[in-house]
Image: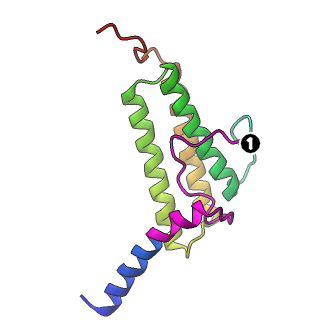
Amino acid sequence: MTNHTRMTLLSVALAAFLLPAAAQNGASTPASASTPASASAPASATAPASTPTQSGPETGKQVQERKEKQQDRIANGIGNGSLTSGEAANLEKKESQINQEERDMKAMDNGGLTKADRATLQQQQNQVSKQITQDKQNANVRNTNPTT
């Protein structure tokens, strides 16, 4: 392994360990404000009541608020039985894939997202949002009171 390859791998590993720490320390720059939200994240008091209606890509803060809101919608669906465990797992997998793609985009763009990257992520979040609504409103429900 060449020194250049070794240094690149070490740099990537270091960045992977430092990004979550920076997010937990309250860094509020757009580049660090879009780290993945956990399923147990509390509802944001400042989250908009509906999906943003602006014509351009979302800002870093809006992306983070939207992630939190969608996680809350999934958790709510699990809690009230309107989402089955399979539907919830599928939605969580899609959210995870979007988060990974966002991290990959940031890695390629020196820690930031281009306008095109934000637009792509917003489109993917729109698709997941529609899927959450469809899954919660379909006839599949989780049995919240099993008898056995």
Query: Is residue 30 highlighted in magenta?
Result: yes
* Quadrant, the N terminus: bottom left
In the drawing, does residue 24 fall left or right of residue 103? right
Looking at the rendered structure, the number of numbered marks drawn on it comes to 1
Residue labelled with disc 1: 53
In the image, residue 24 lies at what x, y percent? 58, 60
In the drawing, does residue 12 fall left or right of residue 22? left
Q: Which quadrant of the view contains residue 16?
A: bottom left
Residue numbers of the magenta segment: 16-45
In the image, residue 113 lies at what x, y percent? 60, 66
Is 120 or 30 nearer to us in this picture?
A: 30
Query: Is residue 49 highlighted in magenta?
Result: no
Q: Is residue 59 above or below residue 141?
A: below
Residue drawn at the location 40% of the way across and 36% of the way down: 90
Q: The residue tagged with tag 1: helix, strand or loop?
A: loop
Residue drawn at the location 58% of the way across and 41% of the way down: 126
The residue type indicated by label 1 comes to Thr
Residue drawn at the location 74% of the way across and 34% of the way down: 49
